[in-house]
Image (cartoon, rainbow, N blue to C red):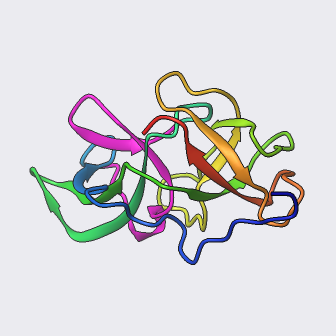
Amino acid sequence: MAGHTFHLSVKAPYPPHSVETAVLGASTSAKFTDADRNKLVKLAAADNYVLVTDGDDIEAMCVSLEPGTVNDGWSYGSVQFKFTNLEAVVSGSTLTVGATVVAGPQAALNTKQDWPVIKAGTGSVFKWRVKSLLGGSGAAGTRVLVEPLTR
């Protein structure tokens, strides 16, 4: 329908059974803090989630942190891994509705980031596309609504 814009009241509505408690960070010395919420993360070898690198698939997002630690000093919190839609900020080239996207460069560990960052690209396992430009142009720095093509 031409002229229609999708809007969300929250960044990523939680579908049932979509959020899990998880160990966070690359090591016990690389702890996540509350500033790391809204960043895209991926599963790592130690059954932990780490920040994605530029160009990785969009797999999951850190949604909350707990004040303590687990497993002899690892950060932990909640990771959302199932999405209906996700509001994100564009990095790199301008995106259009229907364009496929991957993770863009996330802010450094312990640096606040208001929205997940995405860019043009095609994921190898988890595939996503732009659903709406949210009234903007799709240029770098603007927000878009993306949806998973693989659920």
> Image height check: is 55 above or below 137?
above
For residue 63, say whether it is visible. yes
In the picture, residue 98 is in which quadrant?
top right
User: Where residue 17 sits: x, y (%)?
Assistant: 25, 57
In the picture, residue 42 is in which quadrant?
top left
Q: Residue at x 63, y 50 (%)?
A: 146
Q: Residue at x 40, y 57 (%)?
A: 62
> Image height check: is 138 above or below 148?
below
User: Where residue 117 sits: x, y (%)?
Assistant: 64, 51
Q: What is the span of residues highlighted in magenta in the rendered image?
A: 29-52
Front-most of residues 123 and 31: 123
Query: Hey, which residue is sitting farthest top in the picture?
Result: 124
109 relative to 142 in the view: left or right: left
> Image height check: is 78 above or below 118?
below
Front-most of residues 76 and 82: 82
Front-most of residues 75 and 151: 151
Q: Which residue is drawn at 40% across and 70% down?
A: 34
**Is 38 included in the stretch rendered in magenta?**
yes
35 relative to 131 in the view: left or right: left
Q: In which quarter of the image is the N terminus?
A: bottom right
Q: Residue at x 31, y 67 (%)?
A: 65
Query: Hey, which residue is sitting farthest front in the picture?
Result: 1
